Image: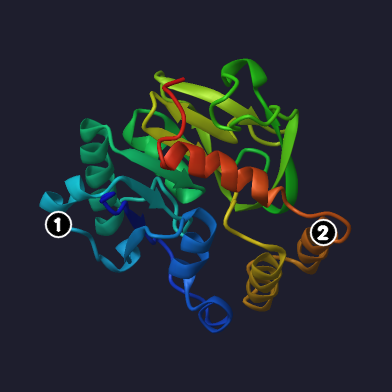
Amino acid sequence: MVEQKKYCLFLATPDSEFVKKAYGGYHHVFVSTFGDEGEHWDSFRVVDGEFPEEKDLEKYDGFVISGSSHDAFENHDWILKLCEMVKKLDEMKKKVLGICFGHQIIARIRGGTVGRARKGPELRLADITIVKDAIKPGTYFGDNEIPESIAILKLHQDEVLVLPESAKLLAYSEKYEVEMFSIEDHFFCIQGHPEYNKEILHEIVDRVLRLGYIQQELADSAKASMENREADRKVLETICKNFLKGRIPTN
């Protein structure tokens, strides 16, 4: 009998009313993107101080750290605790997929620098350029040809300013030097949101506009970027799953 695979999701953001009503919460958004039939997924709302016991970390085959409205360089108690837990996972060589805030947390704990985005925030569908020479054929993209670029939904005001020395840059864009990176074969990080769809981003745009966090011009620009094209969600799902499920050799 094949042992059931177990995965752990660190949720660094609360569920919006829209996500709860439309998808049953972010847990289901992530599992529908990265999960496969027969797997077991646990979620811990780390933003509310909910963490697994350290003794239970070994039972998981992989971990995902979500995005957040908080800054990865802040020193709130829960962020410091998350950093310590990710350091432990690093020691254990556990596979960790970091998304947006999670991408920045991993850079932080490995000695990189995270701060406010030098060219300003991003809220739109954007293209990231793949560093093809840094990716071995048959790894992240499987048997598919490695593309020149990928379209991904972006929502962030911070960035990785300086990569950890041990990191390998895998993608960049016009606005940001670090869009995707890996460390050894157990950390894989993406600044954008492979788990988001157009409806989720539209709702976030409307909500932050209503709250006065962005101007109408930025909201209009964000929606316009998604009018005639979609994110390459299937490609992003393949990349993340190939990493998280151990389907690729060390690269």
| Residue topped by disc 2 | 221
> Is mark 1 in CB contact (under 8 Å) with mark 2?
no
Residue at image point 43% right, 67% down: 27
Question: Measuring 40% from the left and 50% from the top, which residue is drawn there?
Answer: 64
Q: Position of residue 207 (x, y in %)?
A: 64, 75
Side of 101 where 56 appears, left or right:
left
The residue under label 1 is 53
Report the amino acid beneath label 1: Glu
Please tell me which of labels 1 and 2 falls first in the chain.
1
Residue 69 visible to an observer of this rendering:
no
Q: Is residue 23 above or below residue 248?
A: below
Q: Position of residue 130 (x, y in %)?
A: 67, 28
> Which of the two residues, 119 or 196, is positioned nearer the viewer here?
196
Task: Look at the picture and state if 105 lies above or below 48.
Answer: above
Point out residue 67 in the picture as x, y percentages from the top left corner. 48, 55
Picture quadrant where residue 124 is located: bottom right
Query: Residue at coordinates 32% horizontally, 35% vertically from top-left?
Result: 109
